[in-house]
Each structure stands twice: as structure tokens, then as C-alpha cells.
Image (cartoon, grey):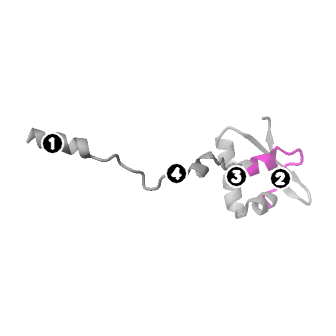
Amino acid sequence: MIANADTKLATKRPRKMAREPKPEEANKATPKRESKTSLVLGMLQRQEGATVDQLAVATGWLPHTTRAALTGLKKKGHAVTSDKVEGQGRIYRVVGP
């Protein structure tokens, strides 16, 4: 019985991956696309800042989702400020780095 177990181990083939990577795919470095959150952060870091409507158009989000993203940035430690400007509504900015 022990001899049979030894022969099974010796003849066992190595496991294969579901899909072997092709050599040309391994060398390709695909650039990461910019996330929507980083796009929002970039718009808020501009000197003129951004309104909720501008952010919503740029990201394709609804206004309530855009405001939730602003709250998320605050929770991550960014100093998000807002100023009310007549005729434009609220302008949001990120102060500092």
C-alpha cells in the first residue's frame, strides 16, 4: 500500500492555472484610469472650487451622491469648505494639500 502511494505522488502532474498568461500580456502595463473621487478632489483643489452641479456633470452622479462624496472626503481628513456666492449657489473647495 505504501508503494502505491509513492507512485501516485511521483506521477502527479503540476496544477495549471485556469488561463495561462500570454507573454505579450505580461509585458503590457495598462495605465490606471482616474477615479471619480480623485476627479472630484482635483476640481475642489482649483482656486475657483466647484459647485455640486459642476461636480455632478463631471462625474455623472446625482446631486445627492455628489454631496455624499463630499462627506466622504471630509471623513478621510480633507478640509472641505463651502462659500455661498450670489447667483452661483454654494462653491466647495478643499483647503490645504
Can you give x and y, in whole percent of width and height, for residue 25 in the image?
Answer: 60, 51
Instruction: Kindly identify the amino acid type of the residue bearing the numbered disc 4.
Output: Pro
Is the C-beta separation of discs 2 and 1 under 8 Å? no
In the image, farthest residue toward the right: 87
Q: Is residue 46 magenta?
A: yes
Can you give x and y, in whole percent of width and height, for residue 29 in the image?
Answer: 66, 47
Q: Distance between the Cα atoms at labels 3 and 1?
A: 52 Å
Instruction: Kindly identify the amino acid type of the residue bearing the numbered disc 2.
Output: Ala
Q: Image check: 48 left or right of 70?
A: right
**Residue holding disc 3:** 33
Picture quarter with the C terminus: top right
Which mark is nearer the camera, 4 or 3? 4
Q: Magenta residues?
A: 39-53
SS assignment at label 3: loop
Q: Which mark is residue 46?
A: none
Q: Which mark is residue 50?
A: 2
Q: Residues within 10 Å of mark 1 (few under 14, many from 20)?
A: few
Q: Image check: 52 left or right of 85?
A: left
